[in-house]
């Protein structure tokens, strides 16, 4: 995989302007993006079929951090219309990763406590809480080269700067349920009350420049509109969710950065999280994805 990657010609030569990280989705060379998709899919399709039930690979990327490149704390963009359903990412570093060279870090149990939609043009849900989250809640997952992590795209995650002198190369693969239509939640700031659902397939991610994603293109296939649920319920609920069901067996340490200026809320009880186990910890119990039968990777 690494030697094949070395033959590919990225538009940014793995060194995007401004010390940012490289992500193939943002690259300007469409041939490179197409080949990236083909290469990653050819290696991972059989493996993924072993661990996942009825899934389809929708998008594949290389993430390379040549030296810097913090990725802001985020959830991945939803990729199917039903926000109560799950899509997952397979993340596979091709070098040994630890905290100092930018392994992924997660807020444990943070998937889907609220229906926020991340996307281009959308103000990040955590814009006021990044520091607090990063200080107390992020959990780095050290991994070997070639090991893969499967996680719910709703999980809040982050990757730091790469402080080592070696490139940190990782593969990201977005998988959606095979029977669900892939969608892009298009947000137009002029009509903030709604998202337009755009039908997408793997070619969409290869052929659509990231810079074009924020402008409605006439050839996109619209599937209808959904009400914006961004930033509701209030962000306070997120912190309370963490306190109530996820941390320290539900016990508060008393000094969590709960905001007090955000109006009424409902405290989410443990049942709220009953079916939302942390996929990052190996028990992919979301029935839609997990395979129970053993199988040999193809
Ligand atoms: O590779 C990284 O540093 C970030 C990857 C990521 O955010 C993802 O796989 O969703
Ligand atoms: Fe991500």
Image: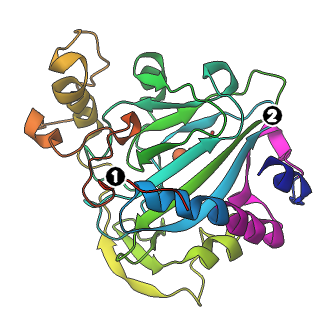
- When asked about the image quadrant of residue 25, the answer is bottom right
Q: Position of residue 106 (x, y in %)?
A: 44, 32
x 62%, y 70%: residue: 205
Q: Is residue 201 left or right of residue 114?
A: right
Q: Is residue 64 left or right of residue 106?
A: right
Residue 35: in magenta span: yes
The mark nearer the N terminus, 2 or 1, is 1
Judge: label 1 CB < 8 Å from ligand 2: no
How packed is label 1: few (under 14 Cα within 10 Å), some, or many (20 or more)? many
Which residue is located at x 78 percent, y 60 percent? 27
Can the viewer see residue 21 in this picture? no
Q: Which residue is mark 2?
A: 167
Secondary structure at badge 1 equals loop
Cα distance between the residues tagged 2 and 1: 33 Å
Q: Quadrant of residue 72?
A: top right
Which residue is identified by label 1?
Answer: 116
Say if the magenta span includes residue 215.
no
Q: State which region is magenta.
A: 13-40
Q: Main secondary structure of the magenta part?
A: helix
Q: Does residue 193 sit above or below 225 in this rendering?
A: above
User: Front-most of 268 and 169?
Assistant: 169
Whereabouts is ligand 1, in terms of quadrant? Answer: top right
Q: Quadrant of residue 145?
A: top right
Task: Give SS at disc 2.
Answer: loop
Where is residue 121 drawn, in percent x and y?
A: 53, 58
């Amino acid at each position: 995989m690494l030697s094949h990657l070395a033959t590919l010609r990225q538009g940014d030569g793995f060194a995007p302007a401004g010390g940012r990280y490289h992500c193939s989705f943002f690259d300007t060379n469409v041939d490179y993006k197409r080949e990236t998709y083909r290469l990653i899919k050819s290696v991972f399709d059989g493996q993924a079929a072993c661990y996942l039930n009825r899934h389809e690979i929708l998008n594949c990327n290389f993430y390379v951090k040549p030296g810097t490149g913090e990725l802001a704390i985020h959830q991945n963009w939803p990729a199917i219309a039903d926000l109560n359903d799950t899509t997952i990412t397979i993340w596979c570093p091709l070098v040994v990763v630890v905290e100092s060279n930018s392994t992924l870090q997660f807020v444990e149990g943070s998937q889907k406590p609220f229906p926020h939609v991340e996307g281009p043009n959308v103000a990040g849900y955590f814009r006021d809480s990044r520091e607090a989250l990063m200080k107390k809640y992020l959990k780095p997952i050290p991994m070997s080269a070639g090991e893969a992590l499967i996680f719910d795209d709703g999980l809040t995650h982050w990757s730091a700067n790469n402080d080592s002198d070696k490139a940190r190369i990782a593969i990201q693969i977005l998988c959606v349920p095979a029977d669900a239509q892939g969608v892009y939640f298009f947000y137009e700031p002029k009509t903030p009350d709604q998202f337009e659902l755009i039908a997408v397939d793997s070619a969409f991610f290869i052929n659509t420049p990231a810079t074009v994603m924020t402008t409605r293109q006439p050839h996109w296939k619209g599937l209808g509109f959904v009400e914006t649920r961004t930033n509701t319920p209030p962000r306070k609920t997120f912190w309370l969710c963490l306190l109530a069901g996820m941390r320290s067996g539900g016990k508060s340490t008393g000094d969590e950065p709960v905001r007090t200026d955000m109006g009424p809320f409902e405290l989410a009880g443990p049942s709220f999280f009953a079916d939302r186990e942390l996929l990052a910890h190996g028990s992919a119990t979301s029935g839609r994805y997990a395979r129970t039968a053993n199988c040999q990777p193809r």
